[in-house]
Structure formats: C-alpha cells, structure tokens
Amino acid sequence: MTLKFQFIQIIRLGFFILMLTNVAGCKKDEVAPPATVIDVCTLPNGFIKWNDNMGNYCATTAFADEAITMTMNGISSNGPTITFDLTDYASGNHPITETINSIYYTNALGFAFTSSNNNPGTLNITYYSPTNHQIKGNFNCFVYDPSGLNPPVYLSGSFSLYYTF
C-alpha cells in the first residue's frame, strides 16, 4: 500500500468516526406538552354562562342558595350581572316572568332590567338534586328596563351550580 492510499484510508476512518459520534449525540427534539386550556367560566361550584345583545359572558363569581326560593347570582368580570329568583325549579320547562322564576339583569353599561309577565321566557331545568345540592339548566327570555328608557335585552344561557341551603 502506498503512503497516499493509507493516508486517505485514515482520513476516511476519521471522518466515519466523526459522523458516528455526531449522529449518536443527536436526540429527538422534545415536544412540549399541549397547553392546558383553562375555562375561566368554570368555578369550583359550577358555572353561569349567557349572552345578550352586546356579547357573551360568564360568571367569574357565582353562587346558588336554596332557602324559601332558589337564588342564583353571577357576576362577570366585564360588568354584567345576572340574578335568578326561582320559585319553580323542579326538572322540566317553566315560564320566566316578573313574578315566577324572575331574572334581574344589569348589562355592561350598568342599566337594570327585569323579566316581564307580558312576555314570558323559558326556563328548562335539566337536573335538580336535593341530595347532591345541584341544579342545571338553560334559559332564554327578554328582560325590560323598568324606566322604559332602554330597549328590551334578549338573554339566553345555561348554568350548572352546586347550591347551599
């Protein structure tokens, strides 16, 4: 073997060893775990979500309490509040009026509205459990400004809350 041929073989062997160490040192790119989506509408005791003529909202603070009636209240971080005074809340469909299953609403501009006997809405209780102290359902109705200065607001939404008693 000539010296030139030996030199080329040594270069090839060195290059081969270099390539092996580079390949062996590589590892798969680590894939970041998917981001956990946090639903700010879901609270430890449940949720109240709704929409009106101006947007979609959810209660970032909510409670439900069964005393003489079932009272549920939700306050959103962007202003609107909703309060339910439910007198008939067994599972099934019920009217929403000013005197039965009333809704009191404050919109994002701070104007107050209430449900009306003249145009009943619908309350659908999908689950009510005195044993588990939980109530679930959905609703839709128009609420009215008692002063008559603002046009009616259409509300629709859903709720699932654990209640105190």
Image: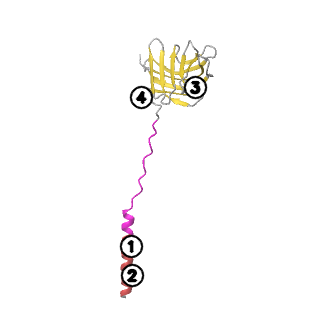
Image x and y of residue 26, in percent: 39, 61
Tell me, yes or no, whether the two marked residues, 3 and 1, touch with CB atoms within 8 Å. no
Residue stretch rendered in magenta on the structure: 19-38
- Residue 125: % across, % down: 53, 20
Query: Considering depth in this image, is 47 or 3 the residue closer to the camera?
Result: 47
Q: Which quadrant holds the N terminus?
A: bottom left
Q: Nearer the viewer, mark 3 or mark 1?
A: 3
Query: Regarding mark 3 in the picture, which secondary structure is present there?
Result: strand
Question: Of the residues shown, which amino acid type is indicated by label 3?
Answer: Ser
Q: Amino acid at mark 2?
A: Ile
Question: Considering only order in the chain, which callout, 4 or 1, is on the residue closer to the N terminus?
Answer: 1
Label 3, label 1: how far apart the Cα atoms are:
70 Å
Whether pointer 2 and pointer 3 mark residues with C-beta atoms closer than 8 Å, the reply is no
Q: Residue at x 52, y 26 (%)?
A: 80
User: Image height check: is 16 above or below 49?
Assistant: below
Q: Secondary structure at mark 4?
A: loop
User: Would residue 136 be found to the left or right of residue 151 on screen?
Assistant: left
Quarter in which the C terminus is drawn: top left
Of circles 4 and 2, the one toward us is 4
Q: Position of residue 20 (x, y in %)?
A: 38, 68
Q: Residue at x 39, y 81 (%)?
A: 8
Say which mark, if any, is on residue 44: 4
Q: Read off the residue under disc 3.
A: 156
The residue singled out by tag 2 in the image is 8
Quick check: is 44 in the magenta stretch?
no
Q: Is residue 33 above or below residue 109?
A: below
- First in sequence, mark 2 or 1: give its number: 2
Q: Is residue 57 above or below residue 96?
A: below
Reading the chain from its start, which is encountered first: label 3 or label 1?
Answer: 1
Mark 1 or mark 4, whichever is nearer to me: 4
Marks 3 and 4 sit apart, C-alpha to C-alpha, by 23 Å
